[in-house]
Image (spheres, grey):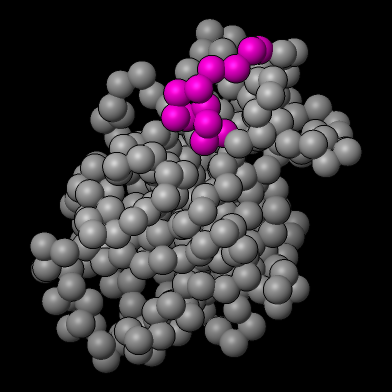
Amino acid sequence: MRRVIRWVDPEGYVSVGVEHPRDGEFSLLRGIEDSLRLLQGESFPLGERLVPADEFSLELEPGLTLIAPIDPPELWCAEGTYDTGDADPVGSSPFREVYTSAAESHRPRLLLKDAGGRRTVGPGHAIGVRGDSTWTVPEPEIAVVIGGKGTILGYTIANDVTSREIESANPLFLTQAKVHAGCCAIGPSIFVPEYEPSGFQIVMRISDEEGEVLYQDTATTAQMTRSFPDLVAWLVRDNPVPAGTVLLTGTGLVLPDELNLLPGQWVEIHVPEIGTLVNHVVLASDLA
């Protein structure tokens, strides 16, 4: 197995497809709409093949719409997991010492960002920015799909949309900074490697409505100060996390203070093994 995707047809039927590593085509799996069953080891007969129009965005033939590769019952995020040098993700916040203390702790910062998929979207769908914030940023991340007893079933891309203004005002406002309509996107696929990956390269691009690139930069998970298994182990410690839960593992890209995510813009996050997650930006109130 390599990559797993899901799509919906014009009649509303959801299908799961699995990639053939040698030719990049995907085969429909018969009798399954929930990719978690496949990730947990169930086998299904193969149906017709699909050839994505684009190797990375995984756009399918007309009439078939890519959706999130899994419906996570819970979606958590980890903070402060990268060595970003002198970059300060909370700007000139008077509470910087709180974040410094947390960064020096053996305990990671974990936050429940969504449950039941109410605020999480897939590729091609709109992400939301809060109307009561003047400084919002996308956070490109590797996300792990978790199975029973904290096993890692696969990897996908996530965009952890965050209001830096609200976060930096007071640490107690962190949930409001990170939890709102359209605050997260995942996809376009789940990557299931044969062996434990040594790392991922993450490229993010932000463009305006006319397609002009406003920002582009690259990070690598080699900058992480915690491993994927370590973060998962902390998440499931004394915490009954259901199979299919997705954990966002933090971002290595701290955007310039003057960059503010606005409605009409586009965010692309590319990881070669997984694909490219593309989403446009709207006001969260339009999604609520």
Q: Residue at x 14, y 76 (%)?
A: 101
Quick check: 40 above or below 230?
A: above
Q: Quadrant of residue 117?
A: bottom right
Q: In x, y percent, where is residue 180? A: 57, 73
Q: In x, y percent, where is residue 89? A: 33, 71
The one nearer the camera, 230 or 88, is 230
Q: In x, y percent, where is residue 37? A: 53, 31
Q: Residue at x 56, y 13 (%)?
A: 20
Quick check: 108 above or below 222?
A: below
Q: Residue at x 68, y 43 (%)?
A: 67
Residue 45 in view (yes/no): yes
Q: Is residue 167 left or right of residue 82?
A: right
Residue 252 in view (yes/no): no
Q: In x, y percent, where is residue 287? A: 72, 69
Quick check: 54 above or below 282?
A: above
The one nearer the camera, 4 or 208, is 4
Judged from this view, the residue extending furthest toward the top is 22
279 magenta-colored: no
Q: Residue at x 59, y 87 (%)?
A: 132
**Stretch in magenta:** 35-46
Quick check: 89 above or below 170?
A: above
